[in-house]
Amino acid sequence: MSDNWLDEYKEGLFSGRIPMRNPKIKKPGDPEYYYYDPRGMDKNAPLKDWKLIGVPTADTPNPALVEMEKINQPNNGQIGWDSPYESREEIEKNVRGLENYLIKEEGLKPFAYRDTEGNRTDCVGHLSPDEKTHIAQPWRNARTKLPATDAERRKMDASLMALPYGKKIGADFYKDKTDLELPEEYCRDLLRQDIVQRHEELSRNFPAYRRLNSAAQMGILETHFNANILGRKDDGTVKWPALRAELKKEKPDLATVCKELHRDETGRQDLIDRNKWAYDQCMKGFFYK
């Protein structure tokens, strides 16, 4: 037994992975075991603040962890949007094409890394806004495939945010800096969720975008996924002003929209390729009336 077995046991209890026997069973139907509910809890909180969840046997999974797993399964590969103009099969075909292209260009990184601006990132360019969101994902030990403990998750996040970042530091720099990983299936589902989210953002902001055929939408989505069409610069001015102005029109000119998807590709072969893909995809488009 390792010297820190007690710490590991306590970690298992407070992360909700190890049940405790109920010493005060008073009547039939009382739970024989309890789990701690780790949702939203600080591990240093006093015991009186922790919620207990009763279960009938020691083999019964912790309902709190089951619920957390459901939250971390974005949408099971479902397309996520309908169109009055096209079949779901046509949209699905085009979304699959975008997914495959993004995986090819960005890579599927099951480990935690920082993007060029220092953001917590993993899978296929997925950003987490804070530590709580980041560590809530289904991290596991890359060697044993067992779920990561709360301590392991927090250590991973703290170590990540202490590492350097920048345009000259690629994602693979971070690969060997942690023992934790995310399942590939989760990463693929997460990518689908991110694409759906960006589609909804563009749909809310640009009514004309909703009238585009899905093939052309993929070109705009690729650029938005990579460079945030709705973002702002450090001085507060909007990014992509010409593109946004054209998309705001009731009857945008498609050639202008496609041309304005261009990103600064100076010294970046990857952006040369991505600009061409987005432009060619966009030019397959037309507006439904």
Image: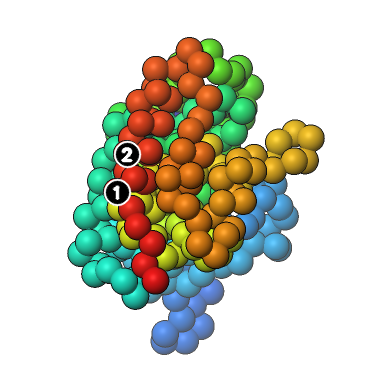
- Badge 1 amino acid: Lys
Seen in the picture, residue 248 relative to 233 is either above or below; the reply is below
Q: Position of residue 12 (x, y in %)?
A: 48, 47
Q: Residue at x 51, y 69 (%)?
A: 53
Element marked by disc 2: helix
Seen in the picture, residue 32 relative to 171 is either above or below; the reply is below
On the rendered structure, is 209 left or right of 57? right
Q: Position of residue 24 (x, y in %)?
A: 53, 74
Seen in the picture, residue 126 relative to 92 is either above or below; the reply is above
- Mark on residue 280? 2
- For the question of whether residue 129 can be seen, the reply is no
Q: Residue at x 56, y 25 (%)?
A: 116
Considering depth in this image, is 251 or 281 the residue closer to the camera?
251
Q: Do callouts 2 and 1 mark residues in contact (Cβ within 8 Å)?
A: yes
Q: Which residue is mark 1?
A: 284
Q: Quadrant of residue 182?
A: top left
Cα–Cα gap, marks 2 and 1: 7 Å
- Mark on residue 139? none
Considering depth in this image, is 28 or 63 the residue closer to the camera?
63
Q: Residue furthest bottom?
A: 28
- Badge 2 amino acid: Asp
